[in-house]
Image (cartoon, grey):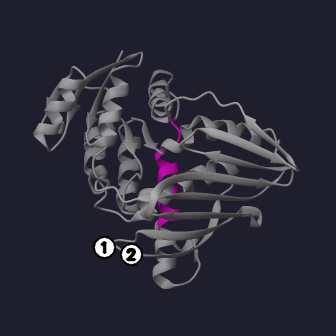
Amino acid sequence: MIKIGVIGVGTMGENHARINSEIKNVKLIGVSDVNEKVAKEVASRYNTDYFMDHLELLEKIDAVTIATPTTMHADVAIAAAEYGVHMLVEKPISNSLFYADKMIKAASENGVKLMVGHIERFNPAVLKLKELVNNEELGEIITISAKRVGPYHPRIRDVGIIIDLAVHDIDVMSYVYGNKIEEVYAIAGNHFHTKEDYASILLKFEKNRSGMIETNWLTPKKLRTLTVVGSGGVAEVNYIEQSLEVMKGEKVELIEVRKKEPLRNEIEQFVSSIIENKKPRPSGDDGKLNLCVAIAAINSYTMGRPFKLRDVEAC
């Protein structure tokens, strides 16, 4: 039985607490949050203890979910590593490559696992799409595009939309393609908020393949789609519906997808990586690479030119 805690129990952290209270091979030992009222309520809801000092919780557990604000990830993760606690860190790994490296180093030096919670990898429709791509059912992949738009969520205060939202699609595109991103060109800006709240991002992959991400916090309706164009067909994922449609010529087929909460898939994989002593994916290195691409996009739009990943310091 793996003893798990959750540090940071806002919207996402509470979902981690809920699932950890339900799944096999896990005992939810406690939750921690700087807001005592919130910590108390979540602990009561899932029949566990709450801790105002996250270090006290770390003393009692084998593994932890870190769902604090992004800028706090590194301090909590490094402390967890020093306590010998395996970590599932909510995406993005950090807002800083310097601190991402410190987190990866701390996990390695202390022999603990570091997984980054890029949840869309675990969407059943994406898993099925990856299977189709691996089996070459769409032929050779030529281009991939994503739309991730919707209204602003007040929980987001410390990063802009590229690091907060576009990083989802950066990860999924790399995962589905299996190719590395080499160069980024982005146009972005802030219409209502202090940080960028809309972005259009063009990605150049190895073998001259392309990806396109459209994201904003300005659209009243929440939309989440991914389209893959191959030499033998086109596939479209609706993340929210967990649906997958494949078009070949005039034929359109709705592929059967067994629906399941993506976060449950993610946490189950994290737990399995501990039990089976295998490297979790997405790993800390995966999370850092996604952050490198996001930072390249930020550099691109602020400088008004394409930006190569090799030119991002520390990538």
Q: Residue at x 32, y 21 (%)?
A: 21
Q: Is residue 172 left or right of residue 130?
A: left
Residue 60 visible here:
no
**Residue 72: horizontal and vertical position, in percent?**
26, 53
179 above or below 184?
Answer: above
Dividing the picture into quadrants, the one containing residue 141 is: bottom right
Task: Name the residue type under label 1.
Answer: Thr
Task: Name the residue type under label 2.
Answer: Asn
SS for tag 2?
loop
**Which of the pair 102/43 is nearer the observer?**
43
Query: Residue at label 2?
Result: 190
Query: Residue at label 1?
Result: 194
Task: State if disc 1 and disc 2 touch (CB < 8 Å).
Answer: yes
Span shown in magenta: 280-294
SS for tag 1?
loop
Q: Residue at x 41, y 19 (%)?
A: 23
Q: Is residue 57 left or right of residue 16?
A: left
